[in-house]
Every structure is written in structure tokens, then in C-alpha cells.
Image (spheres, grey):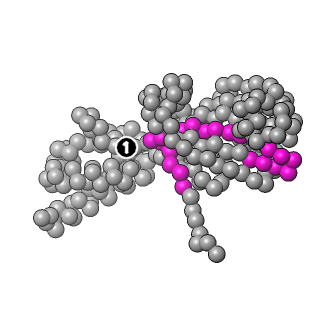
Amino acid sequence: MSTDKEKTLHSRILGDIEQRILTGEWQPGFRLPFEIDLAAQYGCSRMTANKVLTQLARAGLIERRKKSGSFVAQPVAQSAVLEIHDIETEVRSLNLPYRYQIEARTRRKATREDRAQLELLEGGPVLDVSAIHFAGDRPFCLEHRLINLVTVPEAETETFEMLSPGAWLISRVPWNAAEHRIQAMSATPDISAKLEMARGAACLVIERRTWGPEGPVTFVRFSYPGERHALVARFQPGG
């Protein structure tokens, strides 16, 4: 059984480490002292130090790597499932610098797959845009977007140099309906390379369609590294 002294030391060590992480004194990737060093520093048993590190890992504040030690975890981004907002907002919420780069931009006549994704009744011109969003130095997510040029003709001449495609659409085009589809998938070789993750690792994929007064506006697919992203939804009791 734990003694009162061990419980007090456990709380003290836990509080000290949490404060250093949450205040930013210990940044993501910082290696914590080893169990034996924590035990010596606080005058406790290695078991007490181990329990503290285990609790911190369960809370998502640190990650423990076999034979390497314990490290401050990278923050996990959260997306609100029922909201439409810009990727930059997600990155800024992590207190990380944001940037994006356009990978490809093509105007073409809608294919059968394009029509299915945008739910178009007939073919027409679309803009196909791919981009990578970054949080600090790391890729944050991949974006593949189709824009219906029938309802958003001004997108044809937009370079998206100042605003990402999503931010540009939010600021320019009103929408009155949206649909989200969420799934998990294994990263393809292309996604693995662009997101700097292991081939076949889990990805979180969010697909979204939006409609405006004139019809379908856009279809977009966001691919996130699964271990770095979480979804959040808030509900109220039904009336």
C-alpha cells in the first residue's frame, strides 16, 4: 500500500512536471529526466516516479519510448465535427506557426468522379486544387479540393497566394448546407511521404461538401496523421 508520504510526493512530482509542460518551459520533444533521476531528485522510490510518468502518458502530456525515455508529447489538434473553419485556425490553436503551399492547380471539365463528389447533375468546369498545410516545420494535413466553377466562377483566376482555398471560399462564398464524412484509412505511399509518416500508418480523413444558393460549391478531402489529430463534437439533448 502507498504511504501518505508517497502520495504527497506523487502529487508534488506530477504537479511540477505538469506545470513545466503546460507553461511551455518544457516544449514538445523535450526529454524528461529518467525514473532514476526523478527518484533521486525528489527522494522517492522509482515506483513512485514510474507511476507519475505513467499517469502523464495516459493524460497525453508525454510519450514513453522504449529504451529512449519519456518526451513531452506533440499537442493534438482538435477539429469540431459540426463546424466549418479554416485549417489555419486549427494550427494557431496549438500555438504553432502556420503556412501552406499549393501543390497543384488544374482547371478541367468535370469527370464522372468529380460529378459524384460534388453531386453535379451534369458536367461543367471545375478547379482541382491540392495543398499541404504546415504546423511549424511539420506537415499538418493534406487538402484535395474541387471547386464548382459554375457557382464560383471567380475562383478560375484566383491564385490562392494570399489565402488558402478554404479560407478564400469562407470569405467569399456564402454556404447554406454542408455534409461531413469521416473515416480512418491507411496512408498511401504518396500521403506517407507528404505527411512524413510511416507507410500504412493510420490517417484521419474528413470529406466535406458544401452548397450555396446557386448549387454545389466545393468538395474537399483533408487527410491528417491519425496520432496528431482528434475530432470533437458538442451535443445538446433533443427536444
Q: Position of residue 157 (x, y in %)?
A: 84, 29
Q: Which stretch appears magenta? A: 210-232
| 71 shown above or below 179 | above
Mark 1, other Cα within 10 Å: few <14 / some 14–19 / many ≥20: many
| 238 shown above or below 232 | below
**Residue 220 or residue 103, whichever sits in front:** 220
Q: Secondary structure at mark 1?
A: strand
**Residue 155 or residue 134, whichever sits in front:** 155
Q: Position of residue 153 (x, y in %)?
A: 87, 36
Task: Name the image quarter holding residue 52.
Answer: bottom left
| 58 shown above or below 98 | below
Q: What residue sits right under mark 1 in the picture?
A: 72
Question: From the viewer's perspective, is 87 left or right of 21?
Answer: right
- What amino acid type should be assigned to the residue bearing mark 1? Val
Residue 237 in sight here: yes
Does the magenta portion include 148?
Answer: no
Question: From the viewer's perspective, is 226 left or right of 125?
Answer: left
State the quadrant of the C terminus: bottom right
Task: Name the image quarter holding residue 172.
Answer: top right
Rendered residue at 76%/42% (across/down):
119
**Residue 77 or residue 234, whichever sits in front:** 234
Rendered residue at 63%/55% (across/down):
82
State the quadrant of the N terminus: bottom left
Q: Position of residue 81 (x, y in %)?
A: 60, 53
Q: Position of residue 43 (x, y in %)?
A: 15, 54
| 110 shown above or below 175 | above
Question: From the viewer's perspective, is 127 left or right of 37?
Answer: right
Residue 43 in sight here: no
Does the magenta portion include 219?
Answer: yes
Rendered residue at 32%/58% (across/down):
15
